[in-house]
């Protein structure tokens, strides 16, 4: 459940803040007394401040990082912008619309009464998909991603409402932890690998004697064991060179330190404008609410 909240929180942040403004103002207007107005305005101001901070954080996370190229991206926190490859092996099918996509998320609601729905089931796809920017390819692991700008589809079946969010193959923006698995970045321990190789050779005693029993006495003495150890070291060095020479696999995933992991069909420029606009909107609401509180305290608001 935690990963689903992390994925939905950007959507809920703005939807719930707008609903909270209307609800609190409606409660204050209905009560029409000074204490209720004060409490509701303070709560609404806090909601606007939280919403402003969340959108500001997202705007700065995108604006402060230049877009990296997959082929030369540094290990760590980066942003990528490429195209999700329409490879049949990496396409999945959305559960209700049955359309091919690279990612989906869904919620199922059951009618509680004439005006209310109750959430009964939710989920998201976990399959990785590949993006390319012309310099290389990168696998994207969408678990825990905050997804912005997917196509939203709503369907009804009896007393159930089904909401799907879908990302199709095409332009994809990703902000998260970039890691290269294998290749020159592969962590290797020569001492451990030599010990494991020698242990493997010792299990095949006949083969070990054939290779290193130089005097033919059926035993491996210290001198012969030293030869075996040096041969194992050379073999491990050769294997390590081959592993590091092989191309690594690039992966984008959620940062372990909890930083923003963003996945979007929008370009970084549109995302920055989107969050900047929301910052201004919630900031103006906060200023308006604070002015209303000042007028309320001066006794002119309800006059």
Image (cartoon, helix red, strand yellow):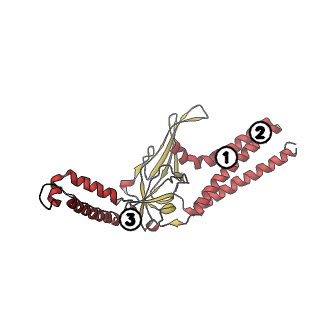
Mark 1 touching mark 3, by CB under 8 A? no
Secondary structure of residue under mark 2: helix
How dense is the environment of label 1, judged by Cα within 10 Å: few (below 14), some, or many (20 and up)?
A: some
Mark 2 touching mark 1, by CB under 8 A? no
Give percent across and percent down for residue 109: 53, 37
How dense is the environment of label 2, judged by Cα within 10 Å: few (below 14), some, or many (20 and up)?
A: some
User: Alpha-carbon distance for marks 2 and 1?
Assistant: 16 Å
How dense is the environment of label 3, judged by Cα within 10 Å: few (below 14), some, or many (20 and up)?
A: some
> Which numbered mark, 2 or 3, is in the foreground of this view?
3
| Residue closer to the observer: 277 or 2 | 2
Compared with residue 242, is residue 91 higher up or lower down, i.e. above or below?
above
User: Alpha-carbon distance for marks 1 and 3?
Assistant: 49 Å
- Residue at the disc numbered 2: 28
| In this rendering, position of residue 91 left or right of residue 41 | left
Give percent across and percent down for residue 108: 51, 39
| In this rendering, position of residue 158 left or right of residue 136 | right
- Residue at the disc numbered 1: 18
Badge 2 or badge 3: first in the primary sequence: 2
Q: Residue at x 60, y 35 (%)?
A: 116
| Residue closer to the observer: 235 or 116 | 235
| In this rendering, position of residue 5 left or right of residue 95 | right
């Amino acid at each position: 459940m935690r990963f689903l909240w992390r994925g939905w929180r950007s959507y809920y942040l703005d939807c719930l803040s707008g609903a909270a403004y209307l609800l609190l103002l409606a409660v204050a207007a209905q009560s029409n007394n000074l204490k209720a107005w004060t409490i509701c305005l303070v709560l609404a101001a806090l909601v606007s401040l939280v919403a402003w901070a969340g959108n500001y954080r997202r705007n700065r996370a995108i604006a402060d990082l230049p877009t990296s190229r997959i082929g030369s991206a540094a290990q760590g926190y980066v942003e990528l912008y490429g195209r999700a490859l329409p490879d049949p092996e990496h396409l999945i099918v959305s559960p209700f619309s049955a359309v091919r996509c690279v990612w989906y998320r869904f919620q199922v609601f059951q009618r509680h009464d004439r005006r209310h729905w109750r959430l009964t089931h939710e989920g998201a796809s976990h399959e990785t998909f590949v993006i390319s920017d012309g310099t290389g390819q990168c696998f994207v692991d969408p678990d825990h991603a905050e997804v912005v700008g997917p196509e939203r589809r709503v369907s009804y079946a009896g007393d159930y409402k089904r909401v799907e969010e879908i990302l199709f193959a095409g332009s994809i923006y990703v902000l998260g932890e970039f890691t290269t698995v294998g290749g020159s970045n592969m962590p290797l321990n020569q001492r451990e690998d030599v010990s494991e190789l020698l242990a493997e050779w010792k299990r095949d005693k006949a083969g070990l004697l054939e290779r290193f029993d130089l005097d033919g006495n059926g035993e491996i003495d210290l001198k012969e064991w030293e030869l075996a150890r040096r041969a194992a070291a050379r073999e491990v060095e050769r294997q390590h060179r081959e592993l590091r020479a092989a191309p690594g696999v690039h992966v984008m995933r959620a940062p372990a330190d909890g930083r923003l992991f963003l996945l979007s069909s929008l370009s970084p420029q549109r995302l920055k404008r989107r969050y900047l606009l929301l910052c201004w909107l919630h900031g103006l609401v906060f200023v308006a609410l604070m002015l209303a509180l000042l007028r309320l305290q001066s006794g002119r608001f309800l006059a």
